[in-house]
Image: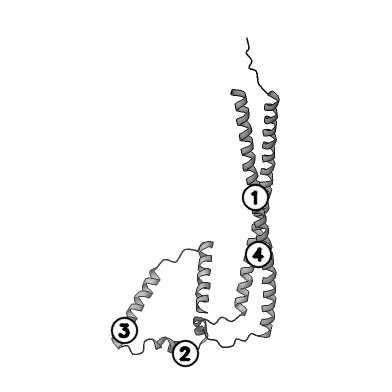
Amino acid sequence: MSYFIKVEDSSGIRKRVLESTKETIMMLKRYQLLLELKSRKKEVVITLKKDIKELNLLILELQKIVPIESLKELQAYLPKHKKERVASKGKKGKTKAKAVIEDRELEKIKEVKANKPKPKQLSEMEKLEKALGDIDAKLSQL
Amino acid sequence: MSQAPVFVKIEEFKELTRVLKTIDSKLKDVEKSVAEIKSLREKEAEQINEWDSGIDDIKSKLVEINNELFQ
């Protein structure tokens, strides 16, 4: 024997079920649109990355053409004896003993540097951070 | 930093203008891409908001059906 329960306002319920189904289908449609938007965004981001890389290269090219006149770079262009003179300026007025101690310290530092393991390859992020640091240093000199 | 005048070879100057022009056009491309990404993000946000309201709509309809069936 089967029992039945009377459903009041069956057409209203049916209507709501259909409306919910319609809304769910619309959500699925929106999901498809969202996927399309995401894939388009991905494409644009790839293009943007490529453009930014090219821009970086162009800026490097620009840096090669435009003279850079930081003190260090200028010193590199100076003849050797002038460089030495610049370096020895700081040592003026020091006693011989002090100079010997400084030389020993320099040797120690050199040894420590030689024993240091070579730095591992920088990640992309670290490279960018280093580049930013260099640019900041150059900007602060201006 | 010295304030001495800087001179650039004419060939290098030509190269400089070429590079600057290319940089300018690249920057325009980048600007376009960024604008497109911005608009895509806005559209995405719009879609997600519509999802949100759609879910609320379905929820309220289910509550109504529940009430009518089990009251």
Image quadrant in which you'd find residue B62: top right
Q: Residue flagged by tag 1: what amino acid is it?
A: Glu
**Place of residue A33 in the rendered image (x, y in percent of width and height, measured from the top left):** 69, 46
How far apart marks 4 and 2 lie (CA) works out to 44 Å
Relative height, residue A85 to residue B55 (above, below): below
* Mark with earlier residue (4, 3): 4
Relative height, residue A60 to residue A81 (above, below): above
Q: Are marks 3 and 2 on the same chain?
A: yes
Instruction: Give me the residue at 63% from left, 28% from top.
Output: B65
**Secondary structure category for the residue under label 1:** helix
Instruction: Give me the residue at 65% from left, 53% from top.
Output: B42
Instruction: Give me the residue at 51% from left, 66% from top.
Output: A129
Where does label 1 land, which residue?
Answer: B44
Quadrant the N terminus of chain A occupies: top right
Asked if the residue at tag 4 contacts the one at tag 1, i.e. Cβ–Cβ closer than 8 Å, the answer is no
**Secondary structure category for the residue under label 3:** helix
Q: Residue flagged by tag 4: what amino acid is it?
A: Asp
How far apart marks 3 and 1 lie (CA) works out to 70 Å
Where does label 3 land, which residue?
Answer: A100
The 10 Å Cα crowd at callout 4, few under 14, some 14 to 19, many 20 or more, is some
Q: Residue flagged by tag 3: what amino acid is it?
A: Val
Tag 4, which chain?
Answer: A
Q: Which residue lies furthest to the left in this view?
A: A97
Tag 1, which chain?
Answer: B
Where does label 2 land, which residue?
Answer: A82
Where does label 4 land, which residue?
Answer: A51
Tag 3, which chain?
Answer: A
